[in-house]
Amino acid sequence: MASTTLTLDTINPKVLECEYAVRGEIVILAQRLQEELKNNPNAHPFDEILYCNIGNPQSLGQQPITFFREVLALCDHPALLDKLKHGAYLERASEILHQIPGRATGAYSHSQGIKGLRDKIAAGIEARDGYPADPNDIFLTDGASPAVHTMMQLLIRSKNDGILCPIPQYPLYSASLLSMEALFLNGIKALNISYSFPMVPYYLNEAAGWGLEIAELKNQLETAKSKGLMTFSNDLNISMLPLKVLAENNQKQIVDFCKDEGLVLLADEVYQENIYVPDKQFQSFKKVARSMGYGEKDISLVSFQSVSKGYYGECGKRGGYMEVTGFSPEIREQIYKLASVNLCSNISGQILASLVMNPPKVGDESYESYLAEKDAILSSLARRAKGRRAMYLFPNIDLPKRAIEAAKAVNTAPDAFYARRLLNATGIVFLALALDRFPEHGISGAQYYPKRTKYQPLFPVSPSSTKDSWMNSVTDGSAIVYHRLLELKF
Amino acid sequence: MSSKSLDYENLNENVKKCQYAVRGELYLRASELQKEGKKIIFTNVGNPHALGQKPLTFPREVVALCQAPFLLDDPNVGLVFPADAIARAKHYLSMTSGGLGAYSDSRGLPGIRKKVAEFIERRDGYPSDPELIFLTGGASIGVIQILNTIIRGAHDGILVPVPQYPLYSATISLLGGSLVPYYLEETANWGLDIGNLRQSVTQARSQGTTVRAMVVINPGNPTGQCLSEANLKEVLKFCYENNLVLLGDEVYQQNIYQDERPFISARKVLMNMGPPISKEVQLVSFHTVSKGYWGECGQRGGYFEMTNISPQTVEEIYKVSSISLSPNVSGQIFMGLMVSPPKLGDISYERYVRESKGILESLRRRARIMTDGFNSCRNVVCNFTEGAMYSFPQIRLPPKAIEAAKSAGKVADVFYCLKLLEATGISTVPGSGFGQKEGVFHLRTTILPAEEDMPAIMASFKKFNDEFMEQYEDKGGYSRM
């Protein structure tokens, strides 16, 4: 008897429906082109594929912070403590090892993460916000995404539970298909399918610089309720830090909205250290809520942080946490229970999260060199961002009418059409804006933004000496890219 | 706060149903007592380094160099690190796209997957395809991903051994599927009986369940039994006849404490059986760096290997993996090192072998000490720990003890284990957390406490147990005379 139990016909249909969190069409094409180049270097009019779509800075040459890695190496191999010359990293490593029972970095830890490290993180949060943080509110995770998954599992009971999501995501998110943003970009769709909840989009106002308007939020919420969606479990609020730091006023409105409507606020704050503009400052949602006088009884808030972004860019280490406040003890128990099934997150990532939230300070022996490295990375990013935007550029390319028509003719969104052409011509991979992501909500991006003729690819900036000249030329003008495209004869 | 906020009432039901006793009530109570200053011996989870087992030196040297590649440029690096560790670090770093801090492919670094395939081929004598091997952040993540692919709804059943490691029951609950238990035979050294299997499947089907897959934990957890080749053949034949995907949890394959039944992988047995079975039965095999003699639980490194799964389905599983983004790169390197350890002739070989053998031989001795120790206790019967890391003694609780438990509002073995904890500081996991036959009680402990501490621990247990039994047996039952 044929035993083909697990086939496309019998696989969990939710898996089939979900999109790749990692590989969009453009990336698949790019990987194919890369293979072709390997076999025949002359196959294409470019020498290499430049992956500018992903927030994976260390793969493009960004260096990790030396102090962090020194400490991590010592924690991996404490025998080195006696073998390395004196330095502040020895003290920090010793301190960390002392907090780990038996100095055993290879042991499963407490399911929320090592207590001593959570203490340090809580202290870091308090220093940042000016409001106390409880180490028992912190759950260390393998990057921010498992933390998001945990919250999804708790919140989504059925198709009647919805999540409010901002559209479009692109100005708000990194172009990273491999970051937590993937979750809130492609991946939230995957989670959407996995957990079968309706995503309720709320549209940002382009004319107001992609501002969030509470009226729009309220409107979408009411519409969804009228369609029979019973309970909204939460408002997914993605920090707009990469391109636009949320105005405090906006944040206050969001907090009030969630409090009034009984929504859980999920705040992705992984970009808190990616601000390059001197007059802007990161304000955590917890800080804003507390400054409004709201405490644990007033608002349920989950704040996510990761070691993958910032100036540290440690994607491959998988470190992060969520800080959970404003939930009952029974819910806290359930969160703990879910965390315990996977026992704990990787210890090295936990240590790194504690370093990120509690880096060398003024007066510390390692401070000068740490600061120099941090500043170099941040100013390099800022240079490329020309001081206006954070980690990403978006040259403004007006697509010719014929291009838009050509795209329509092949049933492709204009920007995806552009991105594909660009890749084939230049080997550059960047994310296409995709406003049509949620057609099932009855309104396509193209319809909502009918006058949209611009192409604004999200260009993540990576400081990398080897890619310098190329990056500089591009920052100088989308014009160069645009002209190349014209050469392709639209 | 609005009543619409997340509270216990409106919580996802599947989450409520999900239980994971390994870090449940006993562990939480033990942690409380520890905070109060009581000395606790945690034997609730297979966590060797937490109980004093030292990490193997070679992998730690290599990974430390990968963490801090600037050390490789240090003129004195050769004085501190052996040359083979240095070479390995460079080799692994060259596999990455940017060191430990860059995301890898969601399936793991191709170079490491290739090493895993080579390991499997050496072990089993059959070729293995790296494209069918996905690295994961620990084996548990892989199990969750595969079950997520299989379970469509409440009517899909997964055969799970009883007793089982509660990752399976917890995950099946969370995913909304059905757990179809098949009972292992305690009197036959926790053997797997095909009759029991057939019965379980028949019963499940009569209730409208579509049985989709079968979990086999070999060596077993918590039971430790090592399956014979004959047993595995029966299982594979059974899966073939019933259209089941076999999920081979083989994370304890290095932990073998008897010589009659060395480890043989499900894949090897499957391939040995030849076509059509070898080409038809779908198999997913799981492994980890957390167990064995490596015990690197905190690194979160694992993999699964797929056999006879179609390319399109593999693509879909890739999609599921991609939601977890990328397994941590350090963990991947640990896996790469585990499957390709120092070889004869390498500088670090002798030290590696000495450290590994030391751990394994000690585990073997401890398995024996613990089994014998439990068997010397009143009303306790314990099968020998053939493999894995646990001892799972049966505690024959007298009726009065069971009544007392009821009055206290506790499951009988939870009651016993709490008393054990309070009296001795030994933190175990009650058998009810793993599943057992009605009215039969066990507890699970690990064989991991240091060898020199074992006699004292067993003596402490015996004292508590025998006094407990005296207290709850009918007067005149137990006598020390």
Image: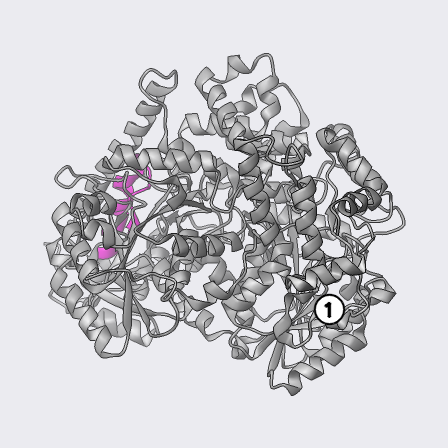
> What residue appears at the point 59 percent right and 35 percent down from the top-left corner?
A43
Residue furthest to the front: A489
Tally the numbered discs.
Answer: 1
In screen coordinates, is A86 left or right of A468? left
Secondary-structure class at tag 1: helix
Asked whether residue B145 is drawn in magenta, I would say no
| B259 versus A407 height, above or below | above
| A379 versus B320 height, above or below | above
Is disc 1 surrounded by few (<14), some (14 to 19) or many (20+) residues within 10 Å? Answer: some
| A111 versus B61 height, above or below | below
On the image, numbered disc 1 is attached to which residue?
A: A446
Residue A71: quarter of image? top right
Residue B53 versus residue A468: which sits nearer the camera? A468
What is the x, y in percent for residue B184?
A: 18, 59
In screen coordinates, is B194 left or right of A117? left
What secondary structure prevails in the magenta region? helix
> What residue appears at the point 75 percent right and 61 percent down from the top-left corner?
A404
Residue B48 versus residue B16: which sits nearer the camera? B16
> What residue appears at the point 49 percent right and 55 percent down from the top-left corner?
B319
Quadrant location, the N terminus of chain A: bottom left
Q: Chain of mark 1?
A: A
Q: Which kind of residue does numbered mark 1 sit on? A: Ala
What is the x, y in percent for residue A80?
A: 54, 23
In screen coordinates, is B173 left or right of A29? left
- Residue A295 seen in render: no
In screen coordinates, is B253 left or right of A27? left
Asked whether residue B456 is drawn in magenta, I would say yes
Residue B366 versus residue B61: which sits nearer the camera? B61
Residue B442 versus residue B194: which sits nearer the camera? B194
Over which residues does the magenta segment extend?
B445-466
